Image (cartoon, coloured by chain):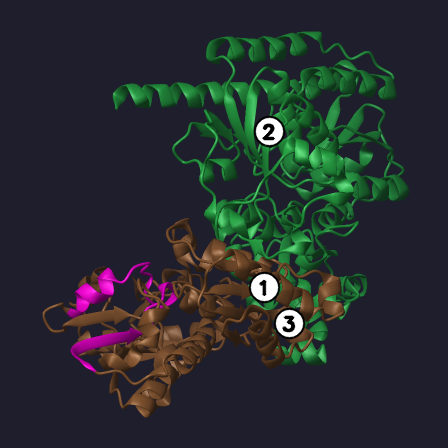
Chain colours: A brown, B green
Amino acid sequence: MKKLLRHMSPLAPDDSGACGVLYEMGGITVICDAGGCAGNVCGFDEPRWHEKKSALFSAGLRDMDAILGRDDMLIDKLAKICRQIDAPFTAIVGTPVPAIIATDYHALQKAAERKTGLPCITMETDGTKLYDFGESLAYERLFRRFAAEKLPVIPGSLGIIGATPLNTGFTNADPVIRSLGTQEYAKITCFGLDSGLDAVSRASEYAEIMVISPSGLKAAQYLHETFGTPFSVGYPCLPEAVLRKTESLSGKRVLIVHQQFAANTLRQTLKHCDTDCATWFLLDRSFAEPGDFRITDEEMLAEAAPHYDVIIADRVLHRIVPHYSGLWIDFPHDAVSGSAERGTL
Amino acid sequence: MNKACYFTASELAERGIGNLPDELCSAKHMIYSSPATLDYNSPGAKGFGVKRAGLVIPESVMLLVAPGCCGRNTALLNSLGYSERFFYLLLDDTDIVTGRYLNKIPKACAEIAEEMNPKPSAIVICVTCADALLGTDMDRVCRSCEEASGIPSVPAYMYALTREKRLPPMALVRKSVYSLLKPQKRKSNECALLGYFSALNDTCELYPLLRSAGIREIHEIGRCKTFAEYSEISRSNFSIVLNAEARYAAQDMQKALGIPFIELTRLYRIDKIRTQYRLLGQAIGADLDDAPYYADAKKKTEEFRLKYGSLRFAVGECLNADSFELALSLLEYGHRVTEIYGTIGERNFVFLKKIAEHSPETRIYSNLDPSMLCYVREPETDAVIGNDAMYYHPDLPGIGFQEEAQPFGYQGVCALFSQLDAALEANKRQEVQE
């Protein structure tokens, strides 16, 4: 049965993706839930929770709040926090509860702005979609709202979109910046990783943008259309362990499973292999090759696996094909297994 | 934000339970997912939440029917050996709008039953906030699942939305896990301990005390390895409820199986423990001689006090105790309590009032209050108890006191002070080394 997961746990959901983008922006982020979704974000999908403080809260909804549509209570609670915490903006992240009661996010945004006097962005995530959908929404909303001013361009500067822990596994920007070589660029900023809203507001001063996950494409397109900033796609921070294990592969049928840009970049390093890339997440056909595909359920991966000599994917996925006879190379992806889960493996 | 918000014990005692400040009422503010909240909000992250609790039925499996976000962190349970026992039926927005997934649940159960060898003893159908709002009739769903799969199905309601209701999720799941018991001839020398999902500590005096009263078999769900062992629980002549959240399960068992129950409370004040055992003895018609256990525990508390003097403690709520009762016991043993991170309710307000008499300046914080993001230690503190307290004070000697083997009675008191002694000794050794 499609949508029945027998071997793996659910993948990182859209609300986790949105929260990951907003985490270091310095705003007050409210997950519009009863508590469980916030627990999933803070306790599982957000490894920075134990390293870096962030004003990320649960709305603490109760059944009658949802049934009676008490948005005013939510706004009152938000206003109360805004009196306690200095923040440049507020953000409201959706979950299944507001989706079911058809919350009017636009009205919520306006009401929040009126009551708090701060800009508010809302993300219509509903917990049924995947993390990159939420990331894409959050990046786009942030840049559209706050990157409005055209600033002089700093030569040799690079802004990176998509560097979230769910995409890279990193909780700070150093590994990404180091992988690009500091000689080549005068300034490198990973938006939302060791940088906050100020960097987003000054996005127009970057000479170029690199998008390292499909979730950053819409924001990059906005910057390109608005400020003329050119963007490229890639994934500069492939894990050393994966590169070491794959360098000797030759003449093999290889399947790489990851987010699209990471998989594509790894494919470029493989020589004399017939390689397909697959992803559980966004697959942008303009960056795909024939043979690349999107995985929609466990059965699909199980059916594809025997066609490949080597599978390079998060090891959690091996549970789907326990009898796979080829070579499996672990390519960790936090949106699949999560750093918290890998710590227990 | 300036600083973490707190109220002193005397302030709160004066206000009364009906007039608690908003900062201590979780429904009146946003919720900070501190480590303590994570423990509560993420069933499966640690300890027994709804998901793990549902699987306490031996040889059972769980089908989580929910949007992907609800089951995401269940992966944390894999390391505890649960990876083969969880299945997920993911819902999308169309499923929720049309309700079509209700027809898929029995089919999913049938697939699970067909695939598994040996067959599971039960399929626990876990539903979340989505079904709470949709008002899904889970009894009917479970009946359909049973018909389709041939395997008993029970619901587990992971309804974070209804946490403060009369029947919160953790009480409902306790009802569910005992609901598969069938009536059978009861045996006068058997009883059941209800309340925890894991068993009491093996050294707990409750076992020998019950045996001294002629009880030969003491059933605990946490000790059941097979479904056959689980089924024997209904042979019990009576149940002892050790956690109030199991009261509803016990009431169900009384109604369906004819098993009456008695309630005990986990306490850390030895005089109260003694009183409780006396009352238990009267209820079951036996004279329980707890004198040696009482003496041991008393000695332990006195030796600790003698060795370390009057220590200043911070007490959390991520532990095997009621924070306020434990804090009160520390005060009665001659120590001081600088801070408590806990949730005040009607049940433990009585302890708070007593704390206010002994130590009016004790600060009470709510782990859930957003201001805890800015928590900084102010009063001098010597040691901490509880995993949340350890998070706030990583530099102080402390104990999590949240083991799976449940402490109870005098054994709990002895374990508390033994562990504190070990932590303080280790800290002393570390200081010497530095």
| Residue A128: x %, y % from top left | 56, 73
- Residue B212 quadrant: top right
Left or right for B72, reference A98:
left
The magenta stretch spans residue B110? no
Which residue is painted at 72% across and 72% down in the image? B102
The answer to whether B111 is drawn above or below residue B226 in the figure is below
> Seen in the image, is B234 located left or right of residue A87?
right
Q: Nearer the viewer, mark 3 or mark 2?
A: 2
Q: Is residue A154 magenta?
A: yes
Q: Is residue B12 left or right of residue B189?
A: left
Magenta part of the protein: which range? A153-180
Q: Are marks 3 and 2 in contact (CB under 8 Å)?
A: no
Write the residue at 55% across / 77% down. A124
Residue, disc 1: A79
Identify residue type, mark 1: Ala
Q: Chain of mark 1?
A: A
Nearest the eye: B83 or B294: B294
Amino acid type at image mark 3? Pro
Q: Which residue is mark 3?
A: A98
Quarter in which the N terminus of chain A is drawn: bottom right
Dot 1 or dot 3, earlier in sequence: 1
Q: Residue A160, percent across and down? A: 28, 74
Badge 3: residue crowd in 10 Å (few <14, some 14–19, many ≥20)? many
- Crowd around label 1: few <14 · some 14–19 · many ≥20 (10 Å): many
**Residue on which disc 2 sits:** B361
Q: Residue at x 48, y 73 (%)?
A: A130
Residue B119 image point, x, y percent: 64, 55
Is residue B158 among the parts visible in the rendering? Answer: no
Q: Quadrant of residue B69?
A: bottom right
Taking depth in this image into account, of B371 and B110 the one nearest to the observer is B371
